[in-house]
Image (tube, helix red, strand yellow):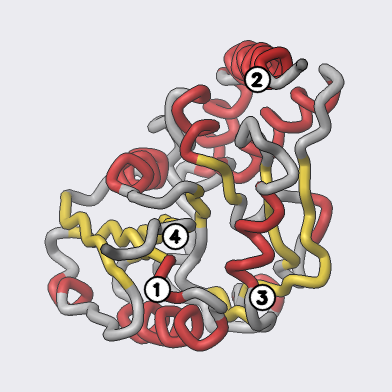
Amino acid sequence: MSAETLLSIVLPTRGRRNLVDRLLDNLAETAQQPDRLEVVLYLDRDDEPSHAVQHGGLKLTKIIGPRAKMGVMSRACQQAAAGRHVMLLNDDVVCRTAGWDTAVVGAFERFPDGIALVWCNDLCRGAAMASFPAVSRRACELMGGICPADYNRDYIDTHLFDIFRKLAALGHNRLVFLRQVVLEHMHHEVGKADLDETYRKVRQSADELAFIAWEEQRQIIAEDLVRHIEASSACVLP
């Protein structure tokens, strides 16, 4: 009987086979329990070189579909994920901390109700933003998915971060920043990579408008999370 998948990595990618191969090798080398990881890739139908991605040390789940918004791809990956927790990741990341997976999964153990937003240090935005956020499968169910389908490519991490900031304002701080766990974002904006087509931002204003439009709904989601937390707490009282 195979071990339960503890963490599913959501990884939409296009035209970056070299970065995907680097990331998969890096994940397998630095994870404490690589056999309990899953990487869920969304690959565009016309990105045929990426269809052949394989890795002997990690479970890969591939979704091959049409070009789509990042929100659509992220939702598709999350829905296909088998893990107890789901983490959004970019293909231009390098894990610098051995056992990062155990640290992420272990952070959720503080919250038996499963509601928390956990993120590591990307050496860029750090504690200021939940880059590469991880949430539980239960939280995804309560939120109606990892994110709305509306976002083209930006604001997904901001959307999740704002939900959990609202949750904290309602009396339940479930924001967990793992400062000592480094998942370095090798982004061109901080001089760690060359500019390519993936980095070029399109329809950024549309994503900002989508974020604004979801303001009220994020508050409703935060209130739903409060009800779940408090109901779960009531169930364990003697």
* Quarter of the figure that contains the C terminus: top right
Dot 2 or dot 4, earlier in sequence = 4
Distance from Cα at disc 1 to Cα at disc 2: 30 Å
Q: Is residue 8 above or below residue 24?
A: above
Dot 3 or dot 4, earlier in sequence = 4
Which of the labelled discs sits on residue 9, or is there none?
4
Q: Which residue is mark 1?
A: 35
Q: Name the side, left or right, on which 159 lies relative to 144.
A: right
Verify CB contact (< 8 Å) between mark 1 and mark 2. no
Q: Which residue is mark 3?
A: 184
Dot 1 or dot 2, earlier in sequence = 1
How far across and how far down the image is residue 107, in percent? 71, 53
Dot 4 or dot 1, earlier in sequence = 4
Q: Is residue 219 visible?
A: no
Q: Residues within 10 Å of mark 2 (few under 14, many from 20)?
A: some
Distance from Cα at disc 2 to Cα at disc 4: 27 Å
Dot 1 or dot 3, earlier in sequence = 1
Query: In front of the other: label 1 or label 3?
Result: 1
Q: Which residue is mark 2?
A: 232
